[in-house]
Image: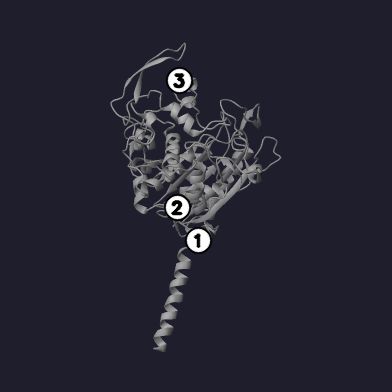
Amino acid sequence: MRVNFFISLSLSATLILVSACKFETSVLPEVPPYSQGMSQPRLDKIDSMLSQTIEDEHLPGIVALIARNGKIVFHKAYGQANADSSKLMQKNSIFRIASQTKAITTTALMLLWEEGKFKLDDPIHKYIPEFKGATILDTFNDEDSTYTSIPSPKEITIRHLLTHSSGIGYGVIDRDLRFKKMYQKAGVTDLFTTKNITIEESVKKLAKLPLHQAPGEVFYYSEGLDVLGYLIEVLSEMPLDKFFKERVFDPLEMEDTFFYLPPTKEDRLVEVLHKVDDTWEKYPVTFYDQDYPISGARKFFSGGAGLSSTALDYAKFLQMYLNDGILNGKRILSRTTIKTILANQMEMWKQGGPKHYSLGFSIINQKGEDEGGQGSLGTFEWGGYFNTQYFADPEEKVIGIIMKQTQGKVEDDSAWRFRQMLFSAIID
């Protein structure tokens, strides 16, 4: 009996030890590259390439991060974080991630899907009645932006919004000038703002406008994720920023990701720069004020483009996906939900291309893998308006993130070079 007691005690201790090892407390620890099958000399070449990019003044500053198997093997900062070079880029510098917000909004929405709050093919008007009776643009008067429309044969569904196939446009960055004018005249707020407006107010104005084409026909990049940001508020009965914090950021220990930065973090925000006569200068206010994360009304929670974050925080978010929904022992999403999110939902710009679109991500298909330098079949990716990019390869268990903050024309080929060189550094 005594022997059995000690055996039982020993087994219990072993189980506790195994459990502790399985769910280690350190999220994305930094380790030697060779321990994760990555070549140090080849990573050194990436380091040299990024350093040279700064030296050649193709970019003012960069933060790059590479993780494999849940471990960071490369995390470095280069160059300046503001126009006068008084602030150097740091690994924990905070960037406006713009459209990288979309994947987080998708994730937050799918948390509610897991709770049975909606079906993906529900019409959006079931939850936001203003979208009832969708119409399609018919005629447009360039002189006064008046228009006529015809009834749409289909209503917009939640899946359409997630896959940029709703027919909604993107206003100020829409490639169709008619929609730029219509959205501006109607007072629709695109992207981000310092003005005193809420996402609810903007989405309800958007709902009254005609579509490019019938929902479900083609991929047309849109502010549908802003609509879904408001849908999250409707379904959860919480402001979007609070829902993100409680359900995504806190569980993932994303301590530097916000719509609007707290005062204690404002000095880490990188300026948006552009080049003027060979000098990096702060980008001027245009149709938006680039200081929106720290100034203005701080009320507009854009589900499509509003967040700011760090390379490390975004790596935690992506690692959760590579871990089938778990990070640091905390279950965020079901493995089966992630399978749905990353499935082929929509062909992108042309048939037979190297990518398709899922729910919130662009996905490398077989053609893309065969072309080389982009990752394995199933690699998911996207980027942001201020020159940020990310990708995560489920087969190789590798994450790549490269953050910059520029607007206007720059001679920047760092994104594709970083990615191509990263995959070449895998040696196991």
**Residue 270, label in figure:** none
Q: CA distance from mark 2 to mark 3?
A: 40 Å
* Percent coordinates x, y for residue 281 in the rendering: 66, 31
Placement of the N terminus among the 4 image quadrants: bottom left
Give above or below for 45 relative to 295: below
The first of marks 2 and 3 along the sequence is: 3
Q: As shown in the figure, which amino acid type bears the numbered disc 1?
A: Ser
Give above or below for 213 relative to 94: above
Q: Residues within 10 Å of mark 2 (few under 14, many from 20)?
A: many
**Residue 320, label in figure:** 2
**Among all residues in the image, which is located at the extreme top?**
143
Look at the numbered disc 2 and give the secondary structure of its residue.
helix
Give above or below for 20 relative to 258: below
Placement of the C terminus among the 4 image quadrants: bottom left
Q: CA distance from mark 3 to mark 1?
A: 55 Å
Residue 223 appears left or right of 300? left
Q: As shown in the figure, which amino acid type bears the numbered disc 3?
A: Met
Q: As shown in the figure, which amino acid type bears the numbered disc 2?
A: Met
Look at the numbered disc 3 and give the secondary structure of its residue.
helix
Q: Label 1: which residue? A: 35
Q: CA distance from mark 1 to mark 2?
A: 21 Å
Of residue 296 and residue 93, the one placed in the foreground of this image is 296
Q: Are marks 3 and 1 in contact (CB under 8 Å)?
A: no
Q: Residues within 10 Å of mark 1 (few under 14, many from 20)?
A: few
Q: Label 3: which residue? A: 182
Q: Residue at x 37, y 24 (%)?
A: 212
